[in-house]
Image (cartoon, rainbow, N blue to C red):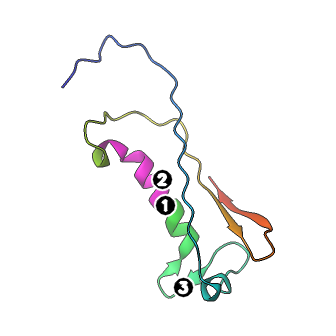
Amino acid sequence: MVDIGSKSVSRRIAIAESRVKLTEKLIKLFEGKDISTKKGPVFTTAIIAGVMGAKRTHELIPMCHPIALENCSITINLNDSSSANKTLKSL
């Protein structure tokens, strides 16, 4: 390990993006705020997974030090066939 005790505090920002193509059958299950399936709400599950991933990045990426998070924002947009962009959730 490297001693980072004398390193000054700095502001860091990370942005990640993912695009998932949904089938028409799945898009038809969209009910205004989420898509419900037999296994539960799809977008709510994705938001929880995103926050957990951000909090545990140091466990998932080799040689990454744990850094305290001040904010974590997850936004899900659904682009329907008419190309209208709808923001579903933001934390």
Q: Are marks 2 and 1 in contact (CB under 8 Å)?
A: yes
Residue 37's tag is: 3
The residue that mark 1 highlights is 48
Q: Position of residue 74 (x, y in %)?
A: 59, 53
Classify residue 44 by image quadrant. bottom right
Residue drawn where x is 49% and y is 61% of the image:
48
Q: Is residue 31 left or right of residue 58?
A: right
Residue type at mark 3: give it. Thr
Q: Nearer the viewer, residue 23 or 65?
A: 23
Q: Secondary structure at mark 2?
A: helix
Q: Position of residue 22 (x, y in %)?
A: 59, 77
Going from N to C along the chain, the mark reached first, 3 or 2, is: 3
Instruction: Establish if 59 lies above or below 69.
Output: below
Instruction: Establish if 44 lies above or below 4.
Output: below
Residue type at mark 1: give it. Ile
Residue 51's tag is: 2
Residue drawn where x is 53% and y is 48% of the image:
16
